[in-house]
Amino acid sequence: MKKFMDENFMLQTQTARTLYHGHAAQMPIYDYHCHLSPQEIAEDRQYDNLGECWLGGDHYKWRAMRTNGVAEEFVTGSASWRDKFQKWAETVPQAIRNPLYHWTHLELQRYFGIDAILKPATADEIFEACTTQLRTPDFSARNLMRKMNVKLVCTTDDPIDSLEWHKQIAADGFEIKVLPAFRPDKAMNLSNSNAWKEYIQALEVQSKCTIVNLDCMLEAIGRRHEYFHSVGCRLSDHGVAYVPDAEATPSELNAIFDKAMAGQPVDLAEREKFEAWFLCEIGKMNHARGWTQQIHMGVFRNSNSRLFQSLGPDIGCDSIADCRQGPGLIKLLDRLDSTNQLAKTILYNINPVDNELIATMCGNYQDGSCPGKIQFGSGWWFLDQKEGMEKQMNALSALGLLSRFVGMLTDSRSFLSYPRHEYFRRILCNLIGTDVENGEIPPDFELLGQMVENISYNNAKDYFGITL
């Protein structure tokens, strides 16, 4: 029987072990999509205890705790961090085969040097040992990043954000590059006209552009796009249930704009026309400035209206959506490609049913301008677990070029999430190693070692072209 999570965790063959220990493990981390707080990095936040650091914003854990019968008071409520941590310690043993079980113990090992299994009987010892370390300067936000050999982080930021914290980080000379990513979802979301109008008013203030029609709105977004570029941004990001298969004339779009600005409800067909137009226009901006655009597709968000009304978004009440992804995506990418305005693009699906669709979609719009211009993004959210990542890489391998893959990201709000890159790398090496030992891939360790290093770090560094 193998020891639980030893140095060869998930590495089932000698070839896998050689590839991981000799190549993947040594590579730095290029975290091009996450939700870390730039303010916490700028202020080099010191966490008071493990409960605060682990449970403060992690909706993955919140979801598991609710499923384990934990009352909301101990999830997002007023209970103490120690009491919340106790409920998490009670939940972990019930999370066997959920990636949270592996992530939890990887984080204990890699950050705190703790090999003990978290359960109610060990909760006191683990909480005190980790909390003692977290209260030292070596465990500040910046030093947690340094421990994991992080070289670059791209946060997720709204166009109306001042980016003051990114500027402060740069001014401090922090050696890890921390850049914003442009996420304009609120500007195209017409599901609530009053909320959208309030957002447009805030956009007016930040862009110093009076918005009275669609052209003015586009100019305002363009000014913020230019401002983000000046602060180092080179990526945009969009979260959609699906890319709409819709078109509209300028007069139709202006009528939709006027309707929303008047606070009148906008129907689904109108929202789809507006969103399709918006994604195309942002795509043109991305191409003009040499950015990479990311499209995250396929989530039903905030499905629990009771918890949404009391707690807000991003609290663990989302699910995989069964939307049709192909037609609208083809229309968007082809529209941009036909005018030579298609930027580097990363497509992320969250429904594994769409793996082959996305893998083949990427091949339609490669143009030889760079390796892997259109990328099939890594297993994301509900798919950033062993089977989800294996399925994504198997589809990419069979239908594209795995060797050109830009690899893993954390997509996390926690400074303790960086072992997810290790998790991914072990799975990658195990996939390749198994094929080698089955005689399906030649045992060319120079070729395969370089491939593993590239997917782990080099491909992303080269693809985004950001000076480190």
Image (cartoon, rainbow, N blue to C red):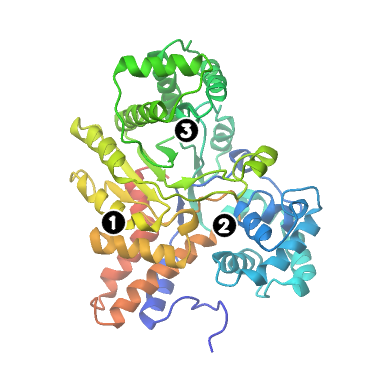
Answer with left or right where residue 102 lies relative to residue 31: right
Total number of numbered discs in the rendering: 3
Instruction: Report the quarter where the C terminus lies.
Output: top left
Give yes or no for contact between labels 2 and 1 (Cβ–Cβ under 8 Å): no
Element marked by disc 1? helix
Residue 233: image tag:
none
Amino acid type at circle 1 is Arg
Whether residue 467 can be seen here: no
| Residue that carries the numbered disc 2 in the rendered image | 417
The x, y position of residue 252, in whole percent, is 34, 18
Which is more N-terminal, label 2 or label 3?
A: 3
Neighbour class for label 2 at 10 Å: few (<14), some, many (≥20)? many
Question: Looking at the image, is 344 positioned above or below residue 197?
Answer: below
Gap between marks 2 and 1 measured at Cα: 24 Å
Of residues 42 and 324, which is closer to you in this image? 324
Amino acid type at circle 3 is Asp
Answer with left or right where residue 280 lies relative to residue 17: left
Which is more N-terminal, label 3 or label 1?
A: 3
Residue 404: image tag:
1
| Quadrant housing residue 67 | bottom right
Amino acid type at circle 2 is Ser
The x, y position of residue 56, in whole percent, is 69, 50
Residue at the spot x=32%, y=65% of the render?
A: 394
Which residue is farthest bottom?
1
| Quadrant housing residue 122 | bottom right
| Quadrant housing residue 123 | bottom right
